[in-house]
Image: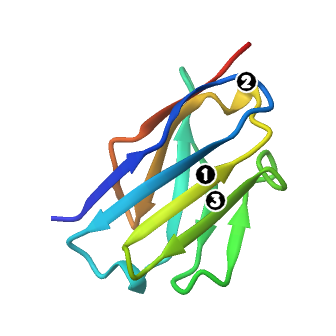
């Protein structure tokens, strides 16, 4: 079945950076738009970013625009999210998604 495995989360101070990775398998990775979503404690899932099949079209939530960069490597079946200038409000579990399939997520904590 579809498998999505996120990694790269951690704890950083405000202003810090992290790069999340997502490995996809058991589906035609290059054929689909992929996205990142996050869920902060006590809140609903929030869409963060999307990237087109070939990576040429990217979209971001207003809350992360200018700070986060999404990319993909279809040859490696990998999705990435470079996160810069992190803020405490970015604290959440981050998931990659394909259609309705979602990985287990990776925790990002931003605190001083």
Q: Which residue is mark 2?
A: 88
> Residue at left 54%, top 55%?
36
Residue indicated by mark 3: 49
- Examine the rendered structure and indicate whether residue 7 appears above or below residue 96: above
| Residue density around tag 2, few if under 14, some if 14–19, many if 20 or more, within 10 Å | some
Q: Residue 111 in the image: x percent, y percent?
A: 69, 17
User: Left of 82 or right of it: where is 34?
Assistant: left
Residue located beneath label 1 in the image: 47
Q: Quadrant of residue 2?
A: bottom left
Picture quarter with the N terminus: bottom left
Give left or right: position of 108 versus 66. left
User: Which mark lies nearer to you, 2 or 3?
Assistant: 2
Does residue 74 appear to the left or right of 25 in the view shown? right
Q: Dot 1: within a 10 Å radius of its alpha carbon, few (fewer than 14), some, or many (20 or more) residues?
A: some
* In this rendering, the label closer to the viewer, 3 or 1: 3
Q: Secondary structure at mark 2?
A: helix
Residue ID at (79%, 50%)? 67
CB-based contact (under 8 Å), mark 3 and mark 1:
yes
Does residue 93 lie above or below 46 as drawn? Answer: above
Q: Callout 3: 10 Å neighbours few (<14), some, many (20+)? A: many
Instruction: Classify residue 32 as left or right of residue 62.
Output: left
Pointer 1 with pointer 2, Cβ within 8 A:
no
Going from the N terminus, do you reach mark 2 or mark 3 first? 3
Q: CA distance from mark 2 to mark 3?
A: 18 Å
The residue lying at 37 percent from left, 74 percent from top is: 76
Q: CA distance from mark 1 to mark 2?
A: 17 Å
Can you say which quadrant of the picture contains the C terminus?
Answer: top right
């Amino acid at each position: 079945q579809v498998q999505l495995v996120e990694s790269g989360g951690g704890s950083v101070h405000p202003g810090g950076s992290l790069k999340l990775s997502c490995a996809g398998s058991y589906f035609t990775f290059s054929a689909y738009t992929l996205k990142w979503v996050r869920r902060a404690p006590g809140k609903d899932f929030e869409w963060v970013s999307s990237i087109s099949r070939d990576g040429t079209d990217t979209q971001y939530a207003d809350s992360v625009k200018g700070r986060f960069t999404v990319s993909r490597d279809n040859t490696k079946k990998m999705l990435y999210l470079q996160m810069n200038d992190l803020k405490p409000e970015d604290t959440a579990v981050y998931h990659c998604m394909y259609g309705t399939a979602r990985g287990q997520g990776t925790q990002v904590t931003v605190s001083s």
